[in-house]
Amino acid sequence: MKTKNDWRWQLANSVRTWDPPGVDRDLADRVLDRFPMSVTPYYLSLMRADDPGDPIHRMAFPHLDELAPSDSTVDDPIREEDHAVMPGLVRRYPDRALLLVSGDCPVHCRHCTRRNMGKGKIVPARGEGLVHALAYIEDNPEIRDVIISGGDPLVLEDRDLIDVLARVRSIPSVEIIRIGTRVPVTLPMRITESLALDIARFGPVYVNTQFNHPAEITDEALAAVGCLVDAGVPVNNQAVLLAGVNDSPEIIEDLCRALMRARVRPYYIFMCDLVRGIGHFRVSLDLGIEIMAHLRGRIGGLGIPQLVIDLPGGLGKIPVGPQYVIGHKDGKTILRAPDGTTVEYCEEKIKS
Ligand code: SF4
């Protein structure tokens, strides 16, 4: 008999209906039509289920604000559709390719950037489509880094996931494989010791995940990432800065410290993309920079992620943050220390 520790039981028993008190059924259905809901019982157990202000609830349950009109948001701000060389394969940079292998996720995060999954070329590469995508990667040997994503690739059965990994690894020009997954956060029982060892066989493989709040780092999540790291699969975190979830320096500091204890490297903090339907999650860039200034000097550099904006128009990611170089004077550079002290830094070569 399957139990709540079984990932298939979790998927089969996910909450997919939303009936908020006092909200017109038609209105609720309009929200779900735009982006359906799915919440695993495990993820549900992390939140105060009757409190829409709870940070985990906010990431998992729909909100009427998703229907708010906006002139500054679009369906695909980072232009993945324009960069798709064929269905299921996106190439935004010369040396990297994004291979979409799944169209579903255990939890449909309300802040998801890839809400357009299933439309146009943003569909999973399966069967013949996967054969074509792999042939394209092989025919373009400048692609050294393949990011396997979706949806969430870890909703595939083990044999299917291993098959994809094996086929990507067999391409001689591919140096590294990355797996983008939120399973350690939303369905951690999916990751077992044997799956982690299977993934490690195709190394170097990196897992990039997305913990956004310290409350997501549970014993179950620690066990999942522990299996991966013990097997030799480095795990990095790509958080998203979200209003009402983690928009404070103290929460991000707690998150980064908890990630470090879990042996997960805080890698990126993304500013929220300009995606239609998630405007209520947006946080000012000034606050993002204030958070980064708060971390510097409080946490060792290994635990400080980079704050990045994925530029609208598909122009790539750029780092943003506090300015520490504040000017030049008399051949010296004026720097600002984390506590605000200014320091003169001499760059002259000293000759004997
Ligand atoms: S796991 Fe990732 S792709 Fe899936 S809904 Fe969440 S953010 Fe979107």
Image: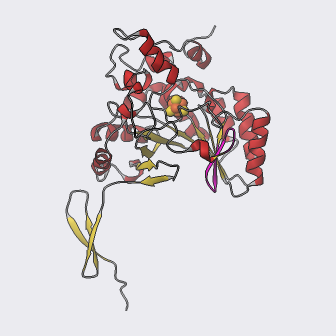
In the rendered structure, the answer to whether residue 315 lies left or right of residue 83 reads left
The answer to whether 301 is drawn above or below residue 283 in the figure is below
The answer to whether 214 is drawn above or below residue 47 in the figure is below
What is the magenta range? Answer: 85-98
Considering the whole magenta stretch, tell me its main secondary structure.
Answer: strand
State the count of labels: 0
Residue at the spot 50% in from the left edge and 24% down from the top edge: 34
In the rendered structure, the answer to whether residue 129 lies left or right of residue 80 reads right
Residue 171 makes an appearance in the image: no
The answer to whether 327 is drawn above or below residue 148 in the figure is below
Residue at the spot 34% in from the left edge and 19% down from the top edge: 52
**Residue 58: image location, x then y, percent:** 38, 24
Q: Which quadrant: the C terminus? A: bottom left
The answer to whether 168 is drawn above or below residue 119 in the figure is below
The answer to which image quadrant residue 67 occupies is top left
For the residue pair 233 and 77, the one nearer the viewer reads as 77
Residue at the spot 64% in from the left edge and 56% down from the top edge: 95
